Image (cartoon, rainbow, N blue to C red):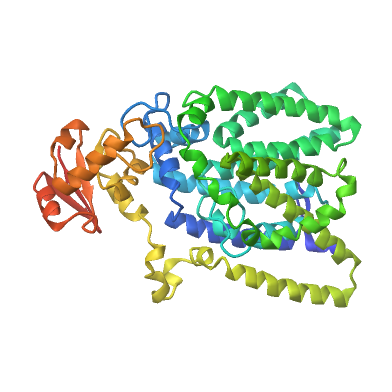
Amino acid sequence: MRQKYNVRLVGIGAIDKKYLVLAVLVWTGLVIHTLSADWSTDFQFHTAAIAEFSTNLFDPRHIFVVPELPHHSLSFYHQVWGALASATGLSALSMAQVVAVVNLTALLVVIPPFVRVFDKRPSAPFVALLLFLLAWGPGAWRLSSLLNLNSLGFGLPYPSYFVVWLSMLAVVIVSKVMRDRGLSWLTALLFAFVGFVGSNAHLAIFGAFGLLLVAVVVTAEDAGRRVGLLALLSFGGGALIGALFYPYPPLIDIVTATGVVDDQNRTVYQSVLIRTAPSLLGLVPLVLRRRNWRTDPLVFAFALLLAVYAAGAILRTFVLGRVIVVMMIILQLALTTWFLDIWDRSDQRQRRLAVGVSVVISTMLLALATSALVRMVPTVLLPESVASDTRLDTPVDWLKDVDSILEPDDVVLAPLDLSQFFPTVGPKIVALDPAAFVDDQPERVADTERFFSELDLSVIDDYDVTWIAYTPDLVSPGVAADIDMLGDVVRFDDVVLVSLN
């Protein structure tokens, strides 16, 4: 009787309709969020990288300042989207919205076959997706690559989410070739390309999924393991090329140039037990399965990832803590199987009770993601008291207007809090703080602050400034009046631009 409540998708198998309903709801809400482009602060890095590649596809500069310096956001992922932005004429901001929808759609399509690698039951994708989204405690991270509702809408255009669904797809395909016990040269080359793209886009997340892939291969039956090892070699070769030899810049330049990138990952070691409390229940089924760790990919992978996570804390190499993304997925997959096992052993009365309890718990967990839910509702449908909340403001609206008058060769001088936004539509800036890979960053910051406090006009000549930008709350009225006299004034909401051309 159960089969009539399922649908069959080509190449995926039977999936409970509940998953499709949930996926459509999530897709719709996150697309609404994406249309407002209300992303986390990392959006400046990724959108600016797309803007830079759309102008200089094979000779990119630093995404924020004029010198031709390396930057960690210049990846093959951004290069592809930059090329498409140039070909279609879309702005970098609009292209980032397209990227977000592509990543969201791919993720929701890949999750069912990925989950079914570890649990074949048709209901498993629905339960897993529900846990991915909601099994989080108070203060859940707003961190790209995590699948909780508090993170997804705020980082969908970022390469980390691309790597999440690409890596899930890799696990699915490798599992299939191991079952088929055959690996063609064409498939091996495809794996190498996936390794190149994945490691180059986000090495930490790709490496974390790589350990899960290793566990899937190592715990496989002997007949399929040889094929799986060949697939791992293909992935590894491509990943090595992507990590070390992609020229904009190679990974080695990023590792040696700055600690800024690593410091941003310190948060994955903070309040971990509180933020992940619901999913930590997954430790119970993992412990129950520990005796079979040599044949259980989830137990094997969790042990590997836990060792890496602990090493990150001990060595204070916090980027290693990003493996927590896959650790959480493993816990949630273990919970999925455990819950379905209990469900299969239950009678009708127990199942009705379980559904009621699940609804109550899900509602409570959903309340912890209120801020994300509000952003999934069109503004016109929100009560005025909510819609007018300044926490819902986004800089994108005025940036779209600014984009129509600024050129990629322009240099904008603005206070540090404001300057970081302009590279997202192409122009460069004098300074922002912090800025990776910029040796004269202290001088740039000092020059910027001196200009807006003392109106030192020499700064304009030193950096070939073509526009000055400010908001009234960032400079004194006297300085603002003097700046307005330097050229033609254009106003966008609270942002004032003065053309020096």
Q: Residue at x 76, y 35 (%)?
A: 214
User: Is residue 308 among what the camera can see?
Assistant: yes
User: Which residue is at a point 68% across and 52% down the rendered structure image?
Assistant: 328
Is residue 383 left or right of 290 when viewed as pictured?
A: left
Image height check: is 400 above or below 61? below
- One can see residue 11 in this view: no
Q: Position of residue 202 (x, y in %)?
A: 57, 37
Residue 254 as seen in the image, left or right of residue 129 = left
Q: Is residue 301 above or below residue 86?
A: below
Q: Give residue 275's position: percent from left, percent from top.
A: 62, 60
Q: Depth check: 434 or 402 in front?
A: 434
Examine the rendered structure and indicate whether residue 57 appears above or below residue 395.
Answer: above
- Residue nearest the viewer, comparing 259 with 37: 259
Residue 28 locus on image (x, y percent) = 56, 60
Vertical side of 465 occupied by 324: above or below: below
Quarter of the rendering occupied by the N terminus: bottom right
Quadrant in which the C terminus is drawn:
top left
Residue 346 spot, x, y in % from top left: 89, 70
Could you say which quadrant of the image residue 383 lies in? bottom left
Q: Nearer the viewer, residue 153 or 90?
A: 153
Labels in figure, total: 0
Q: Is residue 439 left or right of residue 469?
A: right
